[in-house]
Amino acid sequence: MAKVKGAIEVDIERCKGCEVCISACPSNVLAMSKGVNTKGYPYSYMLNPDACIGCASCGYICPDGCIRVYKIKI
Amino acid sequence: MSNPIINPKNLVYEKSSVLLDNTMHYCPGCSHGTVHRIVAEVIEEMNMQDKTIGCAPVGCAVFIYNYINVDFAECAHGRAPALATAIKRLNPDHLVFTYQGDGDLAAIGTGETIHACNRGENITIIFINNGIYGMTGGQMAPTTLVGMKSSTCPYGRDVQLNGYPLNITPLLAQLEGTCYVTRQSVHTANNVKKTKKAIRKAFENSMVGKGTSVVEVVSSCNSGWKMSPVKANTWMEENMLKAYPLGDLKDK
Amino acid sequence: MEEVSLLKGNEAIALAAIRCGADGYFGYPITPQSEIMETLMAQKPWETTGMTVLQAESEVASIYMVFGGASTGKKVMTSSSSPGVSLMQEGVSFLCGADLPCLIVNVMRGGPGLGTIQPSQSDYFQSTKGGGHGDYKLIVLAPASVQEMADFVDLGFTLSSKYRIPSMILSDGAIGQMMEKVVLPPFKPRQTAEEIIKQCPWAATGKPANRKNNIISSLELDPSKMEKKNVERQERYRIVEATEVRYDEYMCEDADYLIIAFGSAARISQNAVEILREEGIKVGMLRPITLWPFPSKVISKYAEKVKSMLTVELNAGQMIEDVKLAVNGKVPVLHYGRMGGIVPNPEEIVDALKKQM
């Protein structure tokens, strides 16, 4: 049982869809959107939000500083 | 549908306020963005925004001043350590750092780099090594690996024609003036944390007058390497890190 | 009472720099100007005024140390001689592109190339026409005495910071090495950090919460913005041309012939004028003190009065081009020059003038 639960918020307009957050996520939470932002980039989102542990790996690796990470203890 | 966890009281990570909101012009997945972000975080954590003067490079990161919200002097190719020398000597209570690529630091500015390090200037040199000239369109850099292709060595770097990759960081570690020389990367979250720690240590060294700190960040240039960002990180790990292994080279 | 010292021109520059509150000197040794840094190092001004003095690894590094210091609003300078100043040209262009004030001293020697260590004035073009790339100007001051070497340091800094244009003292090996009596300028304190922030709101002094980050840069990729920056700079140049021209006149009032010479060539030409006057020939001398802005107006005025003009230069004929532009064909303009480090004697100039009579 996970003792923590996390969630992220992506600044969709800043995101360039580089996917390094997806490769950095240990819990396979993230995926690329089917749609695109106003610049034409697909963006990262939580495909599997329940798996997020709020480790912030995605936030640390994001080259564009698009990701806010939240975490709660449960 | 709103997620109840997404609440300011649960926030554990967001970009630093020292990083401006301007969208960076870098290619998707570029290491520059990650390093900019952590430089901004360290400046914020050290509460040095009003005392920091950065030395911007040539190349892609020329616009670093549009992203990190501190005063900057834009340097000509390779001359950042000379500017930083004077800035720090004339403003000793300021945090002064250069941000330089491999061509800037290890080709056109080799002299300035070595001499600033040898004098032990109380500055930090952040050295982005991606083995290629990014902005000018992917030409060979001094650190381009043997066999690695670029637009000016389209058949791969040939040592007979182009000489060997210049492994400059160990050379800088030999100089009496350097106090901390380290090689890091930002291709995993864990490496990002280590690089941030290294930059923090380097900045702190410069403020207590220990000498020159050099933080090399082995980086990817996925556009120049003609790979996806994720593949570039894997390629970097498999190839660049063999020639440029990570870790501290000097810490005194 | 004023204290009179006996100094070399190079020493006078160094001592004047300390006295006028310079914050930093960055240089690289080269003959015939090495006494400037040697004097500064011997004086140890970091213990008195707090001035920084540093021997750099090259002229390229020196000029970029100047760029760095100037970026933070400090009063900084460098000095070199012709081959070293050639190396600095890239940085000079960058300084002008970033509109940074500073002082560059060139104690000229003969060229091209390694040339000679003897005096010359063959860097006139380089100094006044832009030796580096881009549309730019330097404020160029040409001292003709050790006293002026001392006086032009403060003047150079003052004009440079007023217009945000680098100043150059264009001297030569003769003035740099000769010893003369000189009254050094009075001591002025260095500017405080607060004064710099007030007077140089553009400088990279550390970003407080209440302003945007200051960026010292010559780069602008938007052509319309880049053109605007250039136009603004050219407008400043026009103001300098209208207000900062300096020259000296010697027996010009009733002159039939006018010698135009600067720096050490002007000293010798002055003797030639005296010899010619004794012979009853009405000759005067106009000595440009600012080589840019060039005293074109006054020369053009004399073109209405004199029969001909002679420029005397330690080069193959460089300033003569500006004189001809000012004269605009109204009277003949000839040139007498020596090269290779040879300084003419007054009789040579007397002969040259008589030939054109």
Image (tube, coloured by chain):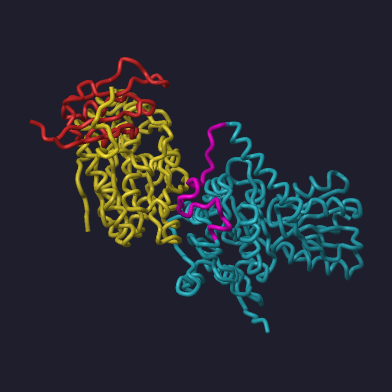
- Any magenta on residue C215? yes
Q: Residue at x 62, y 51 (%)?
A: C165
Q: Quadrant of residue A51?
A: top left
Residue C328, magenta (yes or no): no
Answer yes or no: is residue C203 visible: yes
Which chain: cyan? Answer: C
Say left or right for C126 vs B244: right
Name the foreground residue: C205 vs C17. C205
Q: Quadrant of residue C357?
A: bottom right
In the rendered structure, the answer to whether residue C285 lies left or right of residue B8 reads right
- Asked if residue C76 can be seen in this view, the reply is no
Q: Name the residue located 88 percent from the left edge and 68 percent from the top edge.
A: C277
Q: Position of residue C311 (x, y in %)?
A: 77, 55
Q: Give coordinates of residue C70: x percent, y percent.
A: 52, 55
The x and y percentages for residue C188 are 59, 71
Chain B's colour?
Answer: yellow
Q: Main secondary structure of the magenta part?
A: loop
Q: x, y (%) of residue C211? A: 50, 48
Q: Is residue C92 above or below residue C284?
A: above
Name the tint of chain A in the rendering.
red
Q: Nearer the viewer, residue C290 or C57?
A: C290
Question: Residue B21 or C51: which is nearer the viewer?
Answer: B21
Q: Quadrant of the N terminus of chain C?
A: bottom right
* Above or below for C63 versus A58: below
Please state if A42 lies on the left or on the right of C275 as rendered. Answer: left
Q: Residue furthest left?
A: A1
**B83 up-or-down from C263: above or below:** above
Residue at (41% x, 56% y) in the render: B85
Where does the magenta region start and end?
C196-222
